[in-house]
Image (tube, helix red, strand yellow):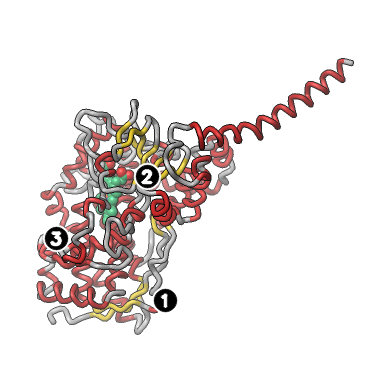
Amino acid sequence: MLDQINLLDAKLAFLLAISMAILYPIAQAIYNVYFHPLSRFPGPISHAISRLPYFYCQINGTLVFDMLTLHQRYGDIVRIAPDELAFSHPDAWKDIMGHKNGEAEMSKASWYYRPIEEPPHIVNEEQERHRSLRRQMAHGFSEKSMRDQEPIIRKYVDLLVDKLRQQSNSLEGSPIVLSDWYNFTTFDIIGDLAFGEPFGCLQGSHYDNWIESIFDLAYIGSILQALSFYPWLKRGLLALVPRSARDAYEKHKKLTEAKMRRRMAVTEERPDLIEGLLKKKDELNLDIEHLVSNAEILIIGGSETTATLLSGVTYLILQDAKAYEKLKDEVRSTFHSREDINLISVNSLPYMLACLDEALRMYPPVANGPPRVCPKGGARILGEYIPENTYASIHHWAMYRREEYFTDPDTYHPERFLGDSRFSNDQREAFQPFHLGPRNCLGRNLAYSEIRLILALIIFNFDMTLADESHDWIQQRNYLTWKKPPLKVYLTPRNEEA
Ligand code: HEM
């Protein structure tokens, strides 16, 4: 008898568990679609029900494009996940990221910025600590510091030009993978500015292991972000990471720490990007792990972005014969020798700046929408009250391709940044590739100067033609960063004093 009751109890418990497993998600879905505080906002039902469609797009590499389709269909505000709204309007930048004049700043979403437990850095630190880190780091990004850094930067750009001259002579009619060379250069520059030593990419004409491991991070990072919403699954999967991968990770960490210790052993003042933090490391309570994580984020944020834009602008101008002719003309009539070209003199190239800005619009290195969190009490965005804890994002690529804000958005027109009347209806405030507000890009000026220097020297030294196999180069997927195929270009060295 007792056995029968126990069996009945077990059956009932099993049935209850099964019913709960089926009913709970259904109830949750009904709540999300009809009763959730965000239910009044438009968007696809599948995205209102669950986070999964968002991550499907992200892991598929199409999120940035899907966002445009969603905004075209549903308008400036779209519910892209049960707890996230995407905004696509010029005013949203200030509302979400601007200085708040005493009101609470919107914090950064931890599922996106800190998908695993690692020592935080300037990009993902919480507000108070971020402010002190930024104040300290800002010294290294000042005009004066950049002038002092010029010899460091210049050394690598000259090496790039020399290496490309050698390569173009030795390859005899084969194209060069210019995207790799841009990466080698920006990694070596930022390696020197963040850790006090280059990665040796240019010298060795190849990627360093350390850098290769960073490339894999973007894809793994997007998976870890998805898993943040399913912590039990994340724990389970992380436990399954093979021993060899863990060992490789530990080795990478040790190498990086050794790099930082070498930099810390330099006693004389060095005009680089980490000096400011080293000076105040005790006051700011920065141990070696925190110093390393800040240096690493400088490498990630300061190299891949810049190299991406360099490849993007090279591709776009080589696809547009008129733009390429104009740019060549500007550079070659302004400068008469390689030595004339420096971080200051490249500021006198308005057409080049317009080419860069238009490349940033069409192919922004940060193309997605890093989410912020609405503070306690909620926030007002585009005149709407948005409840606290809602994630709010602005997707760059999608915003820059909207006809509402940019005339003929899918075509490369540097003239739109030069006051051409055809583009007088453009809404330039929509364009914020470096973000705005207290957490905008610290490296904006460095990025512009470095890119202009490299591009001016390349255009001055070489004639370029895009290889046939790179004609569709820009058709890429995006996994937090663009998955760039090799950009192949034929280079013909010019007589320097021509
Ligand atoms: C074309 C090149 C670049 C683009 C498009 C770019 C874009 C951005 C964006 C959008 C952010 C905000 C990130 C967020 O809030 O999630 C950012 C932050 C940052 N960027 Fe850049 N960046 C570029 C180059 C650089 C360079 C060369 C450096 C130098 C190392 C750099 C250093 C930083 C730093 C330190 C931050 C964090 C600032 C803070 O949180 O206070 N960036 N960048």
Residue 373, x across and y down, in percent: 36, 35
Give the amino acid at mark 1.
Glu
Dot 3 crowding, Cα within 10 Å, few <14, some 14–19, many 20+? many
Checking the image for residue 290, the label placed there is none
Q: Is residue 201 above or below residue 256?
A: below
Disc 1, SS:
helix
Q: Is residue 40 visible?
A: yes
Whole-angstrom CA distance, mark 2 to mark 1, is 39 Å
Location of mark 2 (residue): 77
Dot 2 crowding, Cα within 10 Å, few <14, some 14–19, many 20+? many
- Give yes or no for contact between labels 2 and 3 (Cβ–Cβ under 8 Å): no
Residue 481, x across and y down, in percent: 39, 55
Q: Quadrant of residue 421?
A: bottom left
In the image: residue 51, left or right of residue 361: right
Disc 2, SS:
strand
Q: Is residue 261 visible?
A: no
Location of mark 3 (residue): 343
Residue farthest right in this picture: 1
Q: Quadrant of residue 27?
A: top right
- Residue at coordinates 87% horizontally, 19% vertically from top-left? 3
Whole-angstrom CA distance, mark 3 to mark 1, is 33 Å
Location of mark 1 (residue): 469
Give the amino acid at mark 3.
Leu
Residue 181, x across and y down, in percent: 32, 67
In front: mark 2 or mark 3?
Answer: 2
Residue 299, x across and y down, in percent: 31, 50
Quadrant in which the C terminus is drawn: bottom left
Disc 3, SS:
loop
